[in-house]
Amino acid sequence: MSEAKKSLFIKTYGCQMNVYDSDRMADVLARDGYRRVDSADQADLILLNTCHIREKAAEKVYSEVGRLKKLKDAAASEGRTVSIAVAGCVAQAEGEEIMARAPAVDAVIGPQSYHRLPQVLERVQRDGHAIETEFPAEDKFDHMPAPGSARPKGQISAFLTVQEGCDKFCTFCVVPYTRGSEASRPVDRIVEEARGLVERGAREIMLLGQNVNAFHGSGPDGEDWSLARLLARLSEIDGLERLRYTTSHPRDMRDDLIGAHRDLAKVMPYLHLPVQSGSDRILKAMNRRHGRDDYLQLIDRLRAARPDLALSGDFIVGFPGETDADFAATMELIRTVGYAQAYSFKYSPRPGTPAADRADQVDESVKSERLAGLQTLLGDQQRAFNAQMQGRMMDVLLEKPGRETGQLTGRSPWLQPVQVDAPAALIGSIVPVRIDRIGANSLFGTMLDPVSGDAGDGETAATLRPGAAA
Ligand code: SAH
Ligand code: SF4
Ligand code: F3S
């Protein structure tokens, strides 16, 4: 099957699903003898896994191909063949255009066809190029090797795609076109994949989907299972300690999922729940299918179920027709909710989406000004959220060596990076930590004795645990 070893370099842009997909593509290609390397310099195959979400993201691909062409030409002058393939959402949206605009690209492959990578590369050998952007009838997941089979152990927090695609058609968004219509994977396959990840060392799994809370995968009983039911099932896996999921849509946040945040200890108290805007007028124009009050009531219900739930969101400023008053409503919503973290963007018109054709586009300078204001507020909220951790005791999942020797980096339940002095043998463990200092990007803490709760200075885990009796 595999001849001489060939090397593969993958550069990943965009969202977490692309990170997951890059790993899966590496697994597919490992069967054909490709070994993944960390640099493009000596690679036989260079794969760009691209993102189309905003204009800048897509433009990056063309400039990267320009740089890679030099590498390819230099290799050719030494008699070595380097192939360049473009995968991901730009590939899906602009396959033909990429081929025409960037002849250095040998292959283009869309997100639903990754299982066909070997055949695509064969076609490149035969015909000099290949484009694969049809949505295939078969399910790619049925035709790809188990994740991680080609990679070393040791990923403490792992991604697992459970749902892909989107039928919501927000008027600004390319995802329904690039990822296709919404589909959920069967429960059994997800459980099997999760078990495999845990056997390879994972302690935390982040379930991925463009609309993950719309999950409705077929269960072993023949019924469609909700995300809440899937989380309950995954909670039963020994050794799997933490569960997260992203990205959710406010419309699909059903009662049983809210209940899962109350009832399932392994589901972490952190939720990414994008709202995009705080103005009902803009939400309607975005086709978000919910209003500001629906969102705020949902947040109340979530917080009632899980009082320490931290929220994260996405915001777009300068959507066509957005007025100062609309923007003020977004700022007001942010003040009302209080986010632990958030992503915010200037509206970027995307070809083929309804909002791009509107005549009332907002000036770039206005977008920049609004974005700056919004990010200042969100930055303040994030700092305030982190600051309240000072002196508190929390469980930290230790994931990897820290910046300094003797230090490990872990994550709090609220996704904050935490630096702790701890031996490398504890990587993969959840340990009690007292937070001593709040840095710009991390929290710094002292590991407590898991049994006595003693930090060695008289304070104990029991007295520091939030909510513990004084
Ligand atoms: N599926 C997710 C988000 C996918 S895209 C969801 O429904 O929330 C991630 C974020 O990119 C979006 O939440 C939105 O804030 C931003 N985004 C998407 N299209 C955009 C555009 N045309 N311009 C600016 N930001 C955009
Ligand atoms: Fe895009 Fe809206 Fe679907 Fe999210 S819900 S992927 S923003 S169309
Ligand atoms: Fe980008 Fe596609 Fe993800 S457009 S954000 S890579 S789904």
Image (cartoon, rainbow, N blue to C red):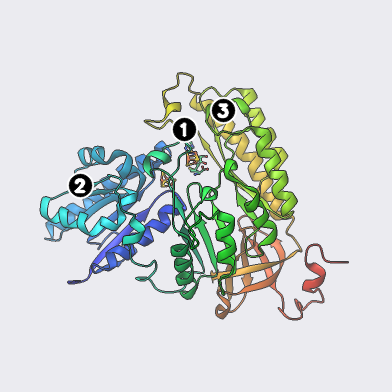
Please state which of the two labelled residues, at mark 2 or mark 1, is closer to the viewer. 1
Q: Nearer the viewer, residue 286 or 63?
A: 286
Q: Is mark 1 within 8 Å of ligand 1?
A: yes
Which of label 3 and label 1 is nearer to you? Answer: 3
Q: Nearer the viewer, residue 288 or 152?
A: 288
Query: As drawn, is 45 to the left or to the right of 255?
Result: left
Question: Separation of disc 2 and disc 3 at Cα?
Answer: 43 Å
Going by the numbered disc 1, the residue's amino acid type is Phe
Q: Position of residue 90 (x, y in %)?
A: 34, 43
Q: Secondary structure at mark 1?
A: loop
Residue 401 at least partly seen: no
Q: Earlier in the sequence, mark 2 or mark 3?
A: 2
Secondary structure found at label 3 = helix
Residue 284 is marked as 3
Residue at position x 72%, y 79% in the image: 449
Three-letter amino acid code at the position of disc 2: Ala
Q: Is residue 275 above or below residue 119?
A: above
